Image: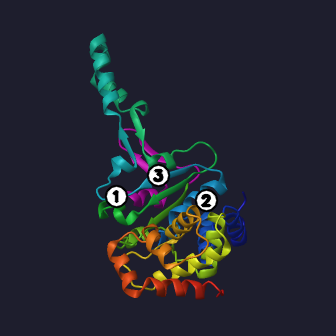
Amino acid sequence: MSLQSVADVRSALDEHNYLASDGLATAVFLAISLNRPLLLEGEAGVGKTELAKVLAKIRNSELIRLQCYEGIDAAQAMYDWDYSRQLLHLRTVEATGEATSIGAEKLEGQLYSERFLIRRALLQAIDQHTGVSPVLLIDEIDRADDEFEAYLLEVLSDFQITIPELGTYKATTPPLVVLTSNRTRDVHDALKRRCLYHWVEHPDFDREVEIVKRRVPQVAETLARQVAAAVEALRKMQLYKPPGVAETIDWATALGRLGVGELDESVVQATLGTVLKYREDHERVRENGVATLVKQAFERGLYSN
């Protein structure tokens, strides 16, 4: 699909049931047209990862996902060597007597050839020959160590990876790179400078209602509005972990499965675990009053912004 304008991007996302704000659609368009990585920050569950998945579908391209975590290093993100196959090859050469005839230098060249190279996510995204560049999702970059960000600089600035034994791999068509962060720590400025940036907000009430209606079509509009209103109220309670869009969808799905037509105190008490995942947050809601939450949901659900 051709994405020649911000309107094209918004329309394509909409067709895949991803309702983006004007700012987010603009950021995506610029990332595509300028071949720049896009760094998305925001609370967990606001749709950062989902955006990358939808973009891969729109472009009809492969989604390559690198899930970051504490302690991740280049071998786990870029490339590694298949040591078990290398050892098997070495034993085979020794058993046949070939090791003596080919010499140590040639044997080393065999062991460190593409035959034994394991392509991890970053190298897979760089070394593509399919014609359609993939979407490279570097998920939760804030979970990685500071040192790992240095490994990314070469990739994000020149879209290339250097392997000492084989040389430099450079992308013929750069991938569309989407980085996400829940901002558990600040990403370094050097990395940010190589990216376009967008902070992904929770959707407003009307947009969240529409998201629920699209993602959970079995739920009536009345309940969709009450759920969106209740989640909006929960986000204002200074919770330890405010619910994201993913939790809104989970809650609506659970209520639909239970055959619920509208919220009431007993339903909220019984299903609160689908939207809030910490005991402290459950206690905060009960302190504020479940009846108050239900009342707010009913009143807010009667009108739009």
Mark number for residue 69?
A: 1
Please give the name of the residue rendered at 53% of the width and 64% of the height, measured from the top-left corner.
Answer: 254
Q: Amino acid at mark 2?
A: Leu
Magenta-tinted stretch = 151-174
Disc 1: CA contacts within 10 A as few (<14), some (14-19) or many (>=20) = some
Residue highlighted by disc 2: 55
Residue highlighted by disc 3: 160
Image quadrant for the C terminus?
A: bottom right
Does residue 216 appear in the picture of this structure? yes
Q: Amino acid at mark 3?
A: Gln
Q: CA distance from mark 1 to mark 3?
A: 22 Å
Q: Left of 140 or right of it: where is 50?
A: right
Q: Residue furthest top?
A: 96
- N-terminal label among 3 and 2: 2
| Nearer-the-camera pick, 281 or 112 | 281
| Nearer-the-camera pick, 27 or 300 | 300
